Image: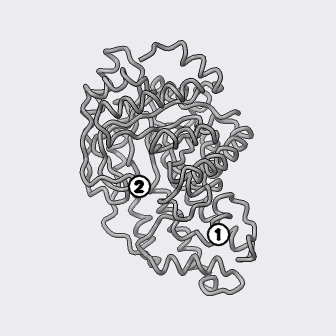
């Protein structure tokens, strides 16, 4: 199937009462795993690349310093790959930009093939956030690309998105934001938190979700709410990492029952990143535990260097930080022996660890979020068709 914009999938979540997980990837091999699991469960899929993930996929190892050119290159890379994977897939797939930093980053993503984008103006004053988001909506909708905005501030850290304190979303302001910008969906702050350290026994402010959803319904406005910072941080994975030499402390996610309770209230898209990083890290640590000779193997120099990086920083669980010795292989997922740095078989084993970690997390959450079997209920709409529909919708 062709890639589709996010809007038809949002409409399906609203109509059929489920939530769609949006799973962050930093490489083609991860995107492939995400799509494979959705195919298995006959669920439409959202493959999500963060703004700085584009910089990483553009070849910038120090992705926190990624330039707009890095992002353009990375967006083209993942865009072309996911487009091809979607063409061969029986389910609808969306390629969504997470936390677009500015207008230029959004344009880079759209040019690279993203069919949905998020512009994060949440750090700005309300009126400036509205103005920026409205301009992005105008640009994206003209190309059939869906748009997610954000109102309210989540605490925690994810890439370059950081805040020490949360600012909960004002439901009345949220409705005003939809009216003034024309966004398709809105990320709100209601008690979730970026990163692995969210605190124990988190309780979500579901009354915020209910208030926004009910006010939107009263005003006759279509709008789906998005839950950021929603990894559940499975404790069994954290424990397994630490048993394998990692040192991850105070890691607690959003209780699954809390997340599931807000789906019927209006949350239709749930973002997950940390859980995937944790599962991949656990799998690679297991690989080295089972294959101790690979830790110090001159034949597979790149692979042994991965272990050295993990051993040097046992608190780290972001694969981008320790897979740099096979960065090109990780990004494109082909298992080539670049520059003679290691054996093809060993590198492919590492990539298999990556894929199995993604599958574990994504598969379990597809089930928990109620998305199983809904692929056929999502309308397959091209970007050109969606652009025509957007033109016929009431303007903000």
Q: Residue at x 58, y 78 (%)?
A: 288
User: Is residue 59 placed above or below 148 in the rendered structure?
Assistant: below
Q: Quadrant of the C terminus?
A: top left
Q: Quadrant of the N terminus?
A: top right
From the viewer's side, name the closer residue of 338 and 239.
Answer: 338
Q: Is residue 10 left or right of residue 171?
A: right
Q: Is residue 166 left or right of residue 136?
A: left
Q: How is the image coloured?
A: one colour
Across and down, in percent, residue 96 comes to 54, 40
Residue 212's quadrant in the figure? Answer: top left
User: Is residue 295 placed above or below 100 in the rendered structure?
Assistant: below
Q: Nearer the viewer, mark 1 or mark 2?
A: 2
The residue carrying pointer 1 sits among few (fewer than 14), some (14 to 19) or many (20 or more) residues within 10 Å by Cα, namely many
Across and down, in percent, residue 24 comes to 51, 50
Q: Is residue 79 left or right of residue 61?
A: right
The residue carrying pointer 2 sits among few (fewer than 14), some (14 to 19) or many (20 or more) residues within 10 Å by Cα, namely few
Q: Residue at x 52, y 39 (%)?
A: 106
Q: Earlier in the sequence, mark 1 or mark 2?
A: 2
Residue under numbered circle 2: 160
Q: Residue at x 32, y 39 (%)?
A: 124
Residue 279 numbered mark, or none: none
From the viewer's side, name the closer residue of 80 and 266.
Answer: 80
Residue under numbered circle 1: 326
SS class of the residue under badge 2?
A: loop
Q: Residue at x 51, y 47 (%)?
A: 23
- Is residue 269 in view? yes
Across and down, in percent, residue 64 comes to 47, 59
């Amino acid at each position: 199937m062709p890639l589709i914009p996010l809007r038809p999938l949002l409409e399906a979540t609203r109509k059929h009462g489920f939530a769609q997980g949006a799973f962050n990837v930093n490489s083609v091999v991860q995107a492939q795993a995400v799509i494979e699991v959705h195919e298995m469960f006959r669920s439409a899929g959202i493959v999500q690349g963060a703004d700085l993930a584009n910089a990483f996929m553009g070849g910038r190892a120090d992705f926190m310093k990624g330039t707009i050119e890095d992002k353009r290159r990375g967006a083209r890379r993942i865009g072309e790959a996911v487009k091809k994977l979607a063409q061969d897939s029986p389910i609808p797939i969306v390629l969504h930009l997470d936390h677009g930093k500015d207008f230029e980053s959004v344009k880079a993503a759209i040019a690279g093939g993203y069919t949905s984008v998020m512009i994060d103006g949440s750090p700005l004053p309300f009126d400036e956030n509205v103005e920026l988001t409205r301009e992005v909506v105008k640009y994206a909708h003209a190309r059939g690309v869906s748009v997610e905005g954000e109102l309210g501030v989540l605490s925690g850290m994810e890439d370059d998105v950081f805040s020490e304190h949360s600012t909960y979303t004002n439901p009345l302001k949220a409705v005003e934001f939809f009216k003034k910008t024309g966004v398709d969906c809105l990320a709100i702050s209601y008690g979730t938190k970026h990163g692995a350290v969210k605190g124990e026994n988190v309780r979500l402010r579901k009354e915020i979700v209910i208030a926004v959803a009910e006010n939107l319904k009263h005003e006759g406005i279509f709008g789906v709410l998005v839950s950021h910072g929603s990894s559940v941080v499975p404790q069994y994975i954290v424990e397994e990492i630490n048993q394998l030499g990692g040192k991850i402390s105070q890691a607690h996610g959003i209780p699954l029952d809390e997340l599931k309770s807000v789906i019927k209230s209006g949350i239709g898209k749930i973002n997950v990143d940390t859980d995937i990083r944790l599962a991949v890290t656990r799998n690679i640590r297991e690989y080295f535990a089972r294959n101790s000779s690979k830790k110090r193997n001159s034949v597979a120099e790149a692979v042994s260097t991965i272990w050295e990086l993990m051993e040097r920083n046992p608190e780290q669980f972001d694969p981008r930080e320790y897979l740099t010795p096979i960065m090109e292989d990780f990004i494109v997922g082909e298992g080539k022996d670049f520059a003679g740095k290691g054996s093809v078989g060993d590198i492919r084993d590492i990539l298999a660890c990556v894929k199995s970690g993604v599958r574990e997390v994504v598969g379990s959450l597809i089930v928990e979020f109620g998305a199983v079997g809904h692929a056929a209920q999502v309308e397959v709409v091209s970007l050109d068709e969606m652009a025509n529909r957007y033109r016929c919708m009431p303007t903000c």
